[in-house]
Amino acid sequence: MTATFIKIQLKRGARMNLTTESVQLVKTLLDRHHRTEKAEMDDIPWAACKDFTVNVGEKQIGAYIKTWELPSCWLYSVDFVCSTEEEHRTFHHYRARFSTPTPRKPIRGTASVYFVVDVSKVKPQTLPVEVIFIVESNKLVHTPGTTRFREKWLVDVIENKTLLQRMIDL
Protein backbone atom coordinates (compact mmCIF):
# COMPACT_ATOMS: atom_id res chain seq x y z
CA MET A 1 0.00 0.00 0.00
CA THR A 2 1.46 3.36 -0.95
CA ALA A 3 0.76 6.50 1.00
CA THR A 4 -0.51 9.50 -0.88
CA PHE A 5 1.45 12.61 -0.02
CA ILE A 6 0.12 16.12 -0.10
CA LYS A 7 2.35 19.16 -0.18
CA ILE A 8 1.40 21.54 2.60
CA GLN A 9 2.58 25.14 2.64
CA LEU A 10 3.62 25.98 6.17
CA LYS A 11 3.48 29.50 7.59
CA ARG A 12 7.27 29.87 7.50
CA GLY A 13 7.31 29.26 3.75
CA ALA A 14 8.60 25.69 3.97
CA ARG A 15 6.79 22.88 2.21
CA MET A 16 6.13 19.55 3.85
CA ASN A 17 4.83 16.28 2.48
CA LEU A 18 2.07 14.75 4.58
CA THR A 19 0.04 11.63 4.02
CA THR A 20 -3.67 12.02 3.32
CA GLU A 21 -4.27 10.36 6.69
CA SER A 22 -2.18 12.98 8.47
CA VAL A 23 -4.03 15.73 6.63
CA GLN A 24 -7.34 14.16 7.67
CA LEU A 25 -6.22 14.01 11.30
CA VAL A 26 -5.22 17.68 11.23
CA LYS A 27 -8.52 18.58 9.56
CA THR A 28 -10.42 16.66 12.25
CA LEU A 29 -8.56 18.47 15.02
CA LEU A 30 -9.17 21.84 13.37
CA ASP A 31 -12.86 21.02 12.94
CA ARG A 32 -13.07 19.91 16.55
CA HIS A 33 -11.38 23.13 17.66
CA HIS A 34 -13.78 25.16 15.52
CA ARG A 35 -16.79 23.34 16.99
CA THR A 36 -15.51 23.95 20.52
CA GLU A 37 -15.06 27.66 19.84
CA LYS A 38 -18.55 27.91 18.35
CA ALA A 39 -20.12 25.87 21.14
CA GLU A 40 -18.68 28.28 23.66
CA MET A 41 -20.51 31.06 21.86
CA ASP A 42 -23.84 29.17 22.06
CA ASP A 43 -24.63 30.53 25.49
CA ILE A 44 -26.37 33.45 27.08
CA PRO A 45 -25.31 35.75 29.89
CA TRP A 46 -26.78 34.06 32.94
CA ALA A 47 -28.28 36.15 35.74
CA ALA A 48 -26.22 37.13 38.76
CA CYS A 49 -27.09 35.20 41.92
CA LYS A 50 -28.60 38.34 43.48
CA ASP A 51 -30.92 38.87 40.46
CA PHE A 52 -32.09 35.28 40.08
CA THR A 53 -35.76 34.35 40.50
CA VAL A 54 -37.71 31.29 39.38
CA ASN A 55 -39.23 33.32 36.53
CA VAL A 56 -35.83 34.67 35.44
CA GLY A 57 -34.54 31.09 35.35
CA GLU A 58 -37.45 29.94 33.21
CA LYS A 59 -36.95 32.80 30.74
CA GLN A 60 -33.20 32.31 30.58
CA ILE A 61 -33.50 28.58 29.94
CA GLY A 62 -35.94 29.40 27.11
CA ALA A 63 -33.46 31.94 25.72
CA TYR A 64 -30.65 29.39 25.98
CA ILE A 65 -32.71 26.74 24.15
CA LYS A 66 -33.24 29.24 21.32
CA THR A 67 -29.45 29.18 20.74
CA TRP A 68 -29.71 25.49 19.88
CA GLU A 69 -29.81 24.80 16.18
CA LEU A 70 -33.12 22.94 16.16
CA PRO A 71 -35.47 22.89 13.17
CA SER A 72 -38.64 24.91 13.65
CA CYS A 73 -40.75 21.72 13.81
CA TRP A 74 -39.59 21.25 17.41
CA LEU A 75 -41.89 22.84 19.95
CA TYR A 76 -41.07 23.00 23.64
CA SER A 77 -42.19 24.31 26.97
CA VAL A 78 -40.10 25.06 30.04
CA ASP A 79 -41.57 24.34 33.46
CA PHE A 80 -40.25 25.02 36.94
CA VAL A 81 -40.25 21.75 38.91
CA CYS A 82 -39.02 22.65 42.41
CA SER A 83 -36.26 24.19 44.49
CA THR A 84 -34.01 22.32 46.88
CA GLU A 85 -31.95 23.98 49.59
CA GLU A 86 -28.53 23.17 50.90
CA GLU A 87 -26.46 25.07 53.40
CA HIS A 88 -24.48 27.07 50.85
CA ARG A 89 -26.69 26.98 47.75
CA THR A 90 -30.17 26.67 46.33
CA PHE A 91 -30.87 24.40 43.38
CA HIS A 92 -33.74 25.34 41.06
CA HIS A 93 -34.97 22.44 38.93
CA TYR A 94 -36.61 22.89 35.50
CA ARG A 95 -37.86 20.60 32.77
CA ALA A 96 -38.05 21.45 29.07
CA ARG A 97 -40.33 19.10 27.12
CA PHE A 98 -39.86 18.81 23.36
CA SER A 99 -42.07 17.33 20.68
CA THR A 100 -42.71 17.59 16.95
CA PRO A 101 -46.49 17.74 16.57
CA THR A 102 -48.04 17.67 13.13
CA PRO A 103 -51.62 18.19 11.94
CA ARG A 104 -51.91 14.45 11.32
CA LYS A 105 -50.37 13.51 14.69
CA PRO A 106 -50.83 16.40 17.10
CA ILE A 107 -49.84 14.20 20.03
CA ARG A 108 -46.52 12.49 19.55
CA GLY A 109 -43.77 11.37 21.83
CA THR A 110 -41.93 13.84 23.99
CA ALA A 111 -38.35 14.15 25.11
CA SER A 112 -37.34 16.08 28.20
CA VAL A 113 -34.21 18.01 29.05
CA TYR A 114 -33.69 18.64 32.75
CA PHE A 115 -31.91 21.75 34.00
CA VAL A 116 -30.58 22.67 37.43
CA VAL A 117 -29.66 26.26 38.24
CA ASP A 118 -27.24 26.54 41.17
CA VAL A 119 -27.58 29.81 43.10
CA SER A 120 -24.74 30.20 45.57
CA LYS A 121 -25.39 31.70 48.99
CA VAL A 122 -21.69 32.21 49.79
CA LYS A 123 -20.01 33.34 46.56
CA PRO A 124 -20.15 37.02 45.63
CA GLN A 125 -23.75 37.66 44.62
CA THR A 126 -22.61 39.47 41.48
CA LEU A 127 -21.31 36.20 40.01
CA PRO A 128 -23.62 34.40 37.57
CA VAL A 129 -25.59 31.32 38.52
CA GLU A 130 -24.26 27.96 37.40
CA VAL A 131 -26.39 25.89 35.03
CA ILE A 132 -26.15 22.26 33.99
CA PHE A 133 -28.52 20.02 32.05
CA ILE A 134 -29.11 16.41 31.14
CA VAL A 135 -31.21 14.81 28.42
CA GLU A 136 -33.86 12.33 29.54
CA SER A 137 -32.58 8.75 29.91
CA ASN A 138 -28.96 9.83 29.41
CA LYS A 139 -26.15 10.00 31.94
CA LEU A 140 -23.94 12.68 30.44
CA VAL A 141 -24.25 16.04 32.19
CA HIS A 142 -23.82 19.10 29.96
CA THR A 143 -22.83 22.68 30.72
CA PRO A 144 -24.12 25.59 28.62
CA GLY A 145 -21.32 27.20 26.69
CA THR A 146 -19.25 24.01 26.53
CA THR A 147 -21.68 21.58 24.90
CA ARG A 148 -23.34 21.91 21.52
CA PHE A 149 -26.84 20.52 21.73
CA ARG A 150 -27.74 17.89 19.14
CA GLU A 151 -31.24 17.32 17.74
CA LYS A 152 -30.35 13.63 17.54
CA TRP A 153 -30.50 13.41 21.33
CA LEU A 154 -34.20 14.33 21.29
CA VAL A 155 -34.94 12.08 18.33
CA ASP A 156 -33.24 9.13 20.06
CA VAL A 157 -35.28 9.58 23.25
CA ILE A 158 -38.57 9.67 21.33
CA GLU A 159 -37.62 6.71 19.14
CA ASN A 160 -36.58 4.66 22.18
CA LYS A 161 -39.86 5.47 23.95
CA THR A 162 -41.80 4.48 20.82
CA LEU A 163 -39.94 1.17 20.55
CA LEU A 164 -40.49 0.45 24.23
CA GLN A 165 -44.20 1.21 23.92
CA ARG A 166 -44.48 -1.14 20.93
CA MET A 167 -42.79 -3.90 22.91
CA ILE A 168 -45.19 -3.35 25.83
CA ASP A 169 -48.19 -3.40 23.48
CA LEU A 170 -47.18 -6.81 22.03
Image (cartoon, rainbow, N blue to C red):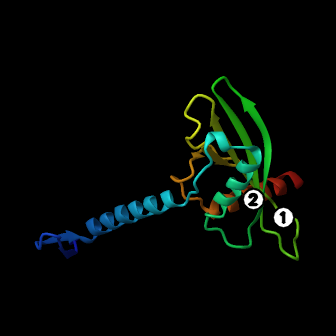
Q: Residue at x 77, y 49 (%)?
A: 55
Query: Which of the 4 image quadrants contains residue 127?
Result: top right
Q: Residue at x 61, y 68 (%)?
A: 69
Q: What is the quadrant of the N terminus in the image?
A: bottom left
Mark 1 is on which residue type? Arg
Of helix, strand and loop, which one carries label 1?
loop
Horizontal side of residue 141 vs 156, given as left or right? left
Looking at the image, which is closer to me, 9 or 143? 143
The 10 Å Cα crowd at callout 2, few under 14, some 14 to 19, many 20 or more, is many
Mark 2 is on which residue type? Ile
Q: Position of residue 27 (x, y in %)?
A: 34, 67
Q: What is the quadrant of the C terminus in the image?
A: bottom right
Q: Residue at x 32, y 63 (%)?
A: 25
Q: Do labels 2 and 1 touch, CB within 8 Å?
A: yes
Horizontal side of residue 152 vs 169, given as left or right? left
Looking at the image, which is closer to me, 108 or 66? 66
Image height check: is 133 above or below 39? above
Q: Position of residue 98 (x, y in %)?
A: 76, 60
* Residue position marked by numbered label 2 in the rendering: 158
* Residue position marked by numbered label 1 in the rendering: 108
Horizontal side of residue 166 vs 155, given as left or right? right
Label 2, label 1: how many angstroms apart (C-alpha)? Answer: 9 Å
Of helix, strand and loop, which one carries label 2?
helix
